[in-house]
Amino acid sequence: MSKKIIIGNMKTKMSYEKVLNYVEKMKGKVTEPNVIFAPTSLYIPYFKEAGLKVGLQDIFFEKEGSYTGEILPTQAKSMGIRYAIVGHSERRIHLKESNQMINKKIKAGLESKMGLVLCVGESKEEKALMETKEVIRRQIFTALKGIDDLKNLVIAYEPVWAIGSGKIPSKRELQKIVVFIKEFVKEIKNGSEIKVLYGGSIRSKNIAIFNQIEELDGYLIGGASNDPEEFLRIIEVTEGL
Ligand code: PGA
């Protein structure tokens, strides 16, 4: 079995001083090619200097032009940054990112030959209404409209209610959704295979549960990726499988 992909979605949690301390601790310790750090973009050069593989937490949907505050995929590429997360629920919630916008981001990112992680997942309310599959279907269908070559894309299932809450889905529940996502993509994309990651309250103390799910291809780790010792423990346990 191929190694699991591990992506640290470090969000906006670290100050400059903390970043310097973090990269110092990580230097030379993470050599697996499938571990990617997605810090606040401002700090990316420090991670690169420490020899760590980096990705962006988001990208913009145009190739060129003036878009104050944004990062274009072409700019990322020019700096050797080959990965980006798109459609994270925090951006959907706070910046009103729509599935259509995410679709444009994926097209722009893939055109620049970036490797992308598309985040999908239902809210607590949608889960209570048993709408999980419907929400995921809609998110994937629209985000992937007009895109046929999926080899540089993975999907991260991140239930909104699990993010930063300490709550996680049961093993059975998660396994079912991972399989559902893989089957759905096959159905709408001519039999294409896709890798599926999980994200939401992953810690070293619960990683063993997730590692038992064979259909899972890896993890998107938020809070825990900001703690160097904790993140190293998760990487060690998972990559040592
Ligand atoms: P969490 O976040 O691990 O802090 O729950 C995951 C994510 O938002 O990607």
Image: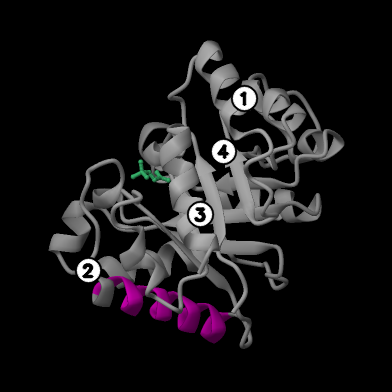
* Residue highlighted by disc 4: 57
Dot 3 or dot 2, earlier in sequence: 2
Q: From what the image shows, is residue 141 above or below residue 13?
A: below
Dot 1 or dot 2, earlier in sequence: 1
In three-dimensional space, the C-alpha distance between marks 3 and 2, rounded to whole angstroms, equals 23 Å
**In the rendered structure, which amino acid carries the disc numbered 2?**
Ser
Q: Crowdedness of circle 4 by 10 Å Cα count: few (<14), some, many (20+)?
A: many
Q: Nearer the viewer, mark 4 or mark 1?
A: 1
Q: State how many labels appear.
A: 4
Dot 3 or dot 1, earlier in sequence: 1
* Residue highlighted by disc 2: 170
**In the rendered structure, which amino acid carries the disc numbered 3?**
Glu
- Element at label 3: helix
From the top left corner, tell me how far across and down residue 161 is, in percent: 24, 50
> Is the CB of the residue bearing disc 3 within 8 angstroms of ligand 1?
no
* Residue highlighted by disc 1: 24
* Residue highlighted by disc 3: 236
From the top left corner, tell me how far across and down residue 90 is, in percent: 39, 38
**In the rendered structure, which amino acid carries the disc numbered 1?**
Glu
Q: Is residue 174 magenta?
A: yes
Quadrant of image for the N terminus? bottom right
Q: Which residues are magenta?
A: 173-188
Dot 2 or dot 4, earlier in sequence: 4
**In the rendered structure, which amino acid carries the disc numbered 4?**
Gln
- Element at label 2: loop
